[in-house]
Image: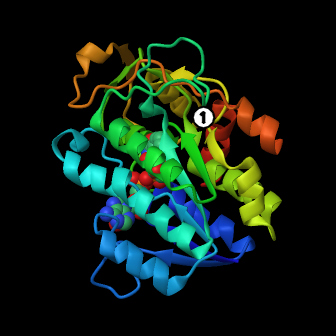
């Protein structure tokens, strides 16, 4: 199986690059469109050209415009990458008879719920990033190529830009850190997202299109359990024993930490559909965090 993989400099893409190697020939594509074998998701022509050249059996697309606050002032670019490119990828996949795995976000929801959102709950994004990611989901669904859209949340890992690494860095520089305690979600380790993706794909090997025609669609993929950003930070410092200057970790309310993009106050996702369909169980977020921190030792 020939797998075209985007976003390999990102958190999830980097993990996927290693995990998917066991399932087929992985062709990793970066974003420098002037390079003959790279594609910029903001440029439809480069997407079409590369996919037609490589003729993959499967396209895995973790690449995205993920700067949630910056998206508020760069809507056009965020929409091109998150909203339009996935539809173009899907059109090309359909022509080739290829399948697509795409990733989306808990930020498609408005946060008004107090029970975990299921795949059939109505999205109502509150920020530009969420709107563009929802547009990407809808574009793939409209094309009708065999696909999986995996919505995840609060992604962290030991590489890239994420909350875990920010906390560890701040703890070496500051005595006090204040973190919002009124946004609830499920921190999800990039490694786990890649593992679950590979486990789903291994069930489909040899018969990808039929498998996805039957079981494809939208799924929620996050660690189980939930916490606030403050709870996440507290757990990081409980499980990490590196040297730090930090003396005080304080919970604050979102109003005390204004950001350009509004975040949902509750964005837990129900993962039962993933379990019921593929028999895959999501580990608890704090256990994953512990494993992630230990994987560095
Ligand atoms: N991060 C989160 O907390 C979170 C939460 C929920 C859902 N998700 C979703 O999960 C998926 C993976 O996220 P992540 O955290 O792994 O993202 P990430 O670490 O921010 O990586 C994004 C990747 O996309 C690439 N990219 C950005 N613009 C591009 C363009 N115009 N053309 C081609 N590639 C481009 C980046 O390449 P460069 O290195 O060249 O910029 C990078 O490899 C995304 O779909 C995201 O929306 C993420």
Q: Is residue 77 above or below residue 246?
A: below
Q: How is the image coloured?
A: rainbow
Q: Is residue 281 visible?
A: no
Q: Residue at x 39, y 55 (%)?
A: 64
Label 1 SS: helix
Q: Quadrant of the N terminus?
A: bottom right
x, y (%) of residue 283? 73, 36
- Quarter holding ligand 1: bottom left
x, y (%) of residue 269? 59, 28
Question: What residue occupies the far left of the structure in this picture?
Answer: 73
Crowding near the residue tagged with mark 1, few <14, some 14–19, many ≥20 C-alpha atoms within 10 Å: some
**Frontmost residue, 201 versus 55:** 55
Number of numbered labels in the structure image: 1
x, y (%) of residue 290? 65, 39
Q: Is residue 57 above or below residue 264?
A: below
Q: Is residue 285 visible?
A: yes
Q: Is residue 41 above or below residue 165?
A: below
Q: Is residue 169 above or below residue 245?
A: below
Q: Residue at x 61, y 42 (%)?
A: 218
Instruction: Report which residue position mark 1 lands on.
Output: 239
x, y (%) of residue 73? 16, 42
Q: Residue at x 25, y 22 (%)?
A: 257
Task: Please give left or right for residue 199 compared with residue 258 in the image.
Answer: right
**Frontmost residue, 153 versus 175:** 153
Q: Quadrant of the C terminus?
A: bottom right
**Frontmost residue, 251 versus 42:** 42
Query: What is the quadrant of residue 165 in the picture?
Result: top left
Q: Residue at x 51, y 31 (%)?
A: 237
């Amino acid at each position: 199986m020939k797998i075209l993989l985007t976003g390999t400099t990102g958190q999830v893409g980097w993990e996927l690059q290693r995990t998917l190697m066991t399932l087929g020939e992985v062709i990793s594509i970066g974003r420098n469109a002037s390079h003959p074998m790279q594609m910029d998701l903001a440029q439809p022509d480069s997407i079409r050209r590369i996919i037609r050249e490589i003729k993959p059996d499967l396209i895995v697309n973790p690449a995205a415009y993920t700067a949630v606050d910056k998206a508020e002032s760069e809507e056009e670019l965020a929409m091109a990458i998150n909203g339009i490119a996935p539809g173009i990828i899907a059109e090309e996949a359909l022509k080739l008879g290829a399948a697509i795995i795409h990733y989306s976000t808990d930020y498609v929801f408005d946060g008004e719920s107090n029970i975990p959102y299921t795949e059939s709950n109505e999205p109502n994004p509150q920020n530009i990033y969420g709107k563009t990611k929802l547009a990407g989901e809808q574009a793939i669904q409209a094309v009708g190529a065999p696909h999986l859209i995996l919505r995840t949340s609060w992604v962290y890992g030991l590489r890239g830009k994420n909350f875990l690494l920010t906390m560890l860095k701040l703890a070496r520089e500051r005595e006090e850190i204040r973190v919002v305690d009124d946004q609830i979600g499920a921190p999800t380790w990039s490694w786990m997202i890649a593992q679950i993706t590979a486990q789903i794909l291994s069930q489909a090997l040899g018969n990808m299109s039929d498998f996805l025609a039957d079981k494809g669609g939208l799924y929620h993929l996050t660690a189980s359990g939930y916490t606030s950003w403050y709870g996440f930070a507290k757990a990081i410092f409980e499980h990490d024993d590196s040297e730090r200057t930090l003396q005080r970790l304080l919970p604050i309310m979102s109003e005390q930490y204004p950001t350009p993009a509004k975040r949902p106050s509750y964005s837990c996702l129900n993962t039962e559909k993933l379990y019921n369909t593929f028999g895959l169980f999501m580990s608890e977020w704090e256990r994953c965090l512990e494993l992630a921190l230990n994987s560095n030792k």
